[in-house]
Structure formats: C-alpha cells, structure tokens
Image (cartoon, grey):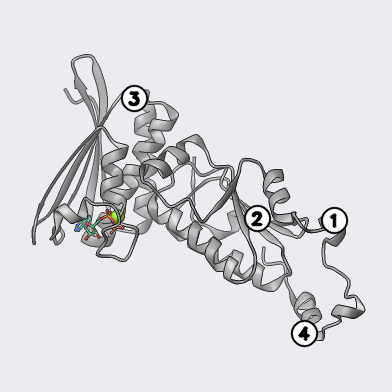
Amino acid sequence: MTISSQSHSITMHETQRCLVVPIQEELSQTAAVIIQQQILERVHARPLIGVVIDLAGVQIIDSALWTTFINTSRMIKVMGVPSVLTGLNPGAVASIIDLQLDCDEIETAMQLEDALTMLTRGCPNPSELAPAPEATPAEADPTTNTAIDASNDAQ
Amino acid sequence: MTLDAIKLQIEETSDVAYAALDAKNFAKGLGFSIADQYTIATAVSELAQNIVKYADFGHVTLTTIEKGSNVGIEVVAKDSGPGIEDLPNAMEDKFSTGGTMGVGLPGTRRLMDDFHIATVLGEGTQIVVKKWL
Ligand SMILES: Nc1ncnc2c1ncn2[C@@H]1O[C@H](COP(=O)(O)OP(=O)(O)O)[C@@H](O)[C@H]1O
Ligand SMILES: [Mg+2]
C-alpha cells in the first residue's frame, strides 16, 4: 500500500454534470490539501451541479484529514455546489465515531450512483445537460460563455 | 516479553502518514482485525500529528506486548517539546491550543484500550497507549 502525496495520482472526471473525485489510496494531509485546491479550481472553472468525493481507498482517517474534507465541502457549498462523500470503509467509520468527528453537516452515500441521484435530484434530466449546455437565448450571457470556453481540463 | 519493536522518527507532516501506515502493518502482523488495524493507525496518526504540531520533533515506538496468553500492541509517542500546560483540559473533547478540533487526545483514549500520559512543562510529553487482540 502506498500513501498518495502526489496530486497527479488523482484523476477527476465528470458525469451528469457532477465532478467525481476518486481517492484510491491513503492520503497524507498534504495531499488532501492539494486535492482540495484542485476541486476548488474545477468548481470555479466549470458549471457543475455537484461534487462526489469517493473515499474508497482511504481507511486511515484522522481528525486533520476529516477537517480538510469538511472544509472542502463547506468551501464548495459557499460556491453554490453541494457535495457528497462516498465509499467510507468500516475502518474509517470506526475512527470517525470514536474520534467523535462532526458528521452532521456532511452528506454521505454508499455508492457513487446514490450520490449522483442525491445531487441530480430536481434536475429534470441531468444526462441531457451534459457535458456543457448550449446557451439558450434566455441565458445568452457572454460572461457565462466565456467562463465555459475558458475552462480547461485541470488534470 | 517484547517480541518485536520499531522506532519511528517524527519530524514532518509526511512522517505522520507513514507512521500511521507502519502502525497499520504492525497491527496486521499481530493478527488484529481490519477495523482494529485502522483504529490503531488513526491513534498513531493523532499522536504523531501532535508531535509535529506542538513539539516539532519526537518518536513513535511500536512494540508487541504480551500478558499471559494475550497479545497486544503498545504505542509510545515521546517528545522533548514544551509539555502540556493544561492536561485536564487537553484531555477534554474540543479543547485545542492550536485552533484545530481538539479530539486527538480524548479520541485516542477512546480508540485504544489503555491510555497513559506523562507531561512536564519545558521537558516534554510521553503518551503510552495499548490495544489488546
Ligand atoms: N505532544 C504535545 N506537546 C505539547 N502539547 C500537546 C501535545 N499533544 C497535545 N498537546 C496539547 O493538547 C491539546 C489537545 O490536543 P488534541 O486533543 O490532539 O487536539 P488538537 O491537536 O486538535 O489541538 C493541544 O491543543 C495542545 O495544547
Ligand atoms: Mg491533535
């Protein structure tokens, strides 16, 4: 097993206008902060309706790492985008409970599909919206279009 | 009787994650359940994090312990840092002088079976925790 401290080991992708961030190995605090930064940049650059952080590869969760995830979720919420944590392992859950980490303000789901259902709820047909919506006359706002065109794939 | 021990130097943030992983593997070698392996790793992560944050430098030692037919792991986190000024409060949830969550010490006590802390102002802190199989 390895510890991810390299940002390039995380490959984010988008589906149904949600950003999916799969974390496949144990994270150092430093790596978590780098990922936080990358998520914020993506949320800022693209019109997303949600973010899913999948912690399937993370078993060792301490209070600092949890705080980073909570803060990431808070920050993107301030940017208008909700998020869901998925893939929490039994090992991680035991630590979260024993450390009495704050779980109230974070949404969780077991599977990616459940998370996407939660995030796309209220969106008529999210798959039709993907990937980048055409500007309709009603929302032909040049600044919005510029933002979409300028968004780069920060992978 | 001590069967096996490893001593880890704790100085930088990256040492924290490696110490946690070493503890996980040590616990696995002793036959701890997967959930216990991560519980122990999390405790080590909290103690090592405190060394980096409050003492700059220290060590974490992992040792196999035995009592009758019981086998367990002992974790010693030792530093020569400033010591803990207000120990009763430091052991309470949500008390932090570092602006963080303040759950490291009380949480580690809950995660492990046995928890001992000795701290002297200006001399350092030693925390000894155990978990039995
Ligand atoms: N190794 C240490 N040396 C000096 N002070 C410490 C050490 N470990 C913990 N402390 C003190 O105990 C407090 C509580 O620690 P902890 O429960 O881990 O919470 P946090 O790390 O979030 O502050 C710390 O804020 C700090 O004042
Ligand atoms: Mg701490």
Q: Amino acid at mark 2?
A: Thr
Residue type at mark 3 is Leu
Left or right: where B86 falls relative to A127: left
Q: Quadrant of residue A78?
A: bottom right
Task: Check disc 2 and report the residue beneath it.
Answer: A11
Observer-nearest residue: A80 or B40?
A80
Tell me the SS state at disc 4: helix
Q: Nearer the viewer, mark 1 or mark 4?
A: 1
Q: Say few, some or many: other residues with alpha carbon within 10 Å of mark 3 (under 14 / 14 to 19 / 20 or more).
A: some
**Foreground tag (4 vs 3):** 4
* 1 or 4: tag closer to the N-terminus: 1
Q: Of tags 3 and 1, which is closer to the observer?
A: 1
Indicate the secondary structure of the residue bearing disc 2.
loop
SS class, disc 3: helix
- Residues A72 and B12: in front is A72
Q: Chain of mark 2?
A: A
Q: Which of disc 2 and disc 4 is earlier in sequence?
A: 2
Q: Nearer the viewer, mark 1 or mark 2?
A: 1
**How busy is the neighbourhood of tag 4: few (under 14 within 10 Å), some, or many (20 plus)?**
few
Which numbered tag is attached to residue A143? 4
